[in-house]
Image: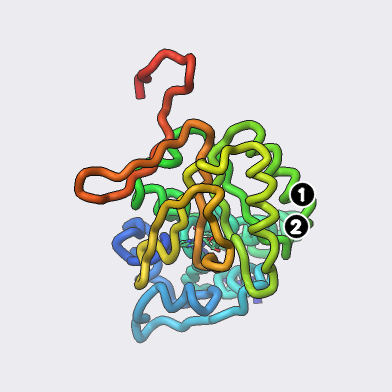
Amino acid sequence: MSETVGGRLAVVGLGPGDATWRTHEASDRLAAATDLVGYGPYLRQVGTLGDHQVAHPFPNRKEAERAVFALELAASGGDVAIVSSGDPGIFAMAAAVVEELHRANNSGRWAGVSVTIIPGVTAATAAAARIGAPLGHDLCLISLSDVLKPWDVIERRIVAAASADFVLALYNPLSRHRPWQLQRALDAIGCHRSPETPVVIARNVARHEESVSTLSLGEVDPSSVDMRTLLIVGSSTTQAFTDRTGRSWVYTPRHYPNSPVGSRD
Ligand code: SAH
């Protein structure tokens, strides 16, 4: 199977939703692909496929299998796109593909396949753009999913990031199988932040039924959050205000208290 000439594999970031938030390179590779591999809902996000294209939907958790399948298809001459929402390098398929390349490095399996990672707009920057600039200063991106890493590692990182006054972008906040993790995370953050800290709750950004709102840390109710939601928890310097038209803004200044105001970039 893998002895043939070898095609190419693009690990494509689809962006958060609407195709206008996708890079040209991503769109070009999606249009050229003979085979598209991905979690079912992400394949639907690609849009209508051409007659020359075949979709290969996979269940959400089969990441290694998905990566091997895509590499095999490419090795047999396919022009393959494996898709992730947002950026493929952030809690998504790029790491699984590169890990399989590493694993196969000594055997030369897939040596003929040309692999490209195509970045995308990740949920955190998409959500931030909707509300202003909450990521204007140092930040940590943390996934609350304890499917692939133990909860105590997650909690340790949250406590470290919160105590170091990073803005936190919380991915995978909660699901039917993980109902308590978000409240635990908020409690841990609350030990280092005031209850007035702005929290952006962004659901389905750049998709149908988008909603983006701002609450204070003390007000966040996990029962209103699901897997399509990203939370941005401000640092001690993050500000929220409503302008004269009623629009809400959140931003984290680039300067820190006691630092000279202004910067060169
Ligand atoms: N690779 C993706 C992240 C995958 S993890 C990226 O870079 O964005 C899946 C999590 O991302 C979801 O549980 C949610 O927290 C967040 N997410 C992805 N797309 C989103 C969107 N359009 N709106 C809000 N959150 C989103």
Q: Can residue 18 be seen in this view?
A: yes
x, y percent for residue 202: 44, 58
x, y percent for residue 231: 52, 54
Identify the amino acid type marked 1.
Val
* Relative horizontal placement of residue 123, taking residue 189 as reference (left or right): left
Vertical position of residue 92 compared to residue 61: above or below = above
Residue nearer the viewer, 219 or 181: 219
Q: Can residue 10 be seen in this view?
A: no
How many discs appear? 2
Vertical position of residue 188 compared to residue 223: above or below = above
Vertical position of residue 138 compared to residue 183: above or below = above
Q: In which quarter of the image is the C terminus?
A: top left
Residue 149's disc is 2
Residue position for label 1: 153
* Relative horizontal placement of residue 201, taking residue 27 as reference (left or right): right
Residue nearer the viewer, 74 or 173: 173
Vertical position of residue 117 compared to residue 31: above or below = above
- Residue at the image point whose x is 66% and y is 34% from the top: 163
Identify the amino acid type marked 2.
Lys
Instruction: Tell me, yes or no, whether the two marked residues, 1 and 2, touch with CB atoms within 8 Å.
Output: yes
Q: Is mark 2 on a helix, strand or loop?
A: loop
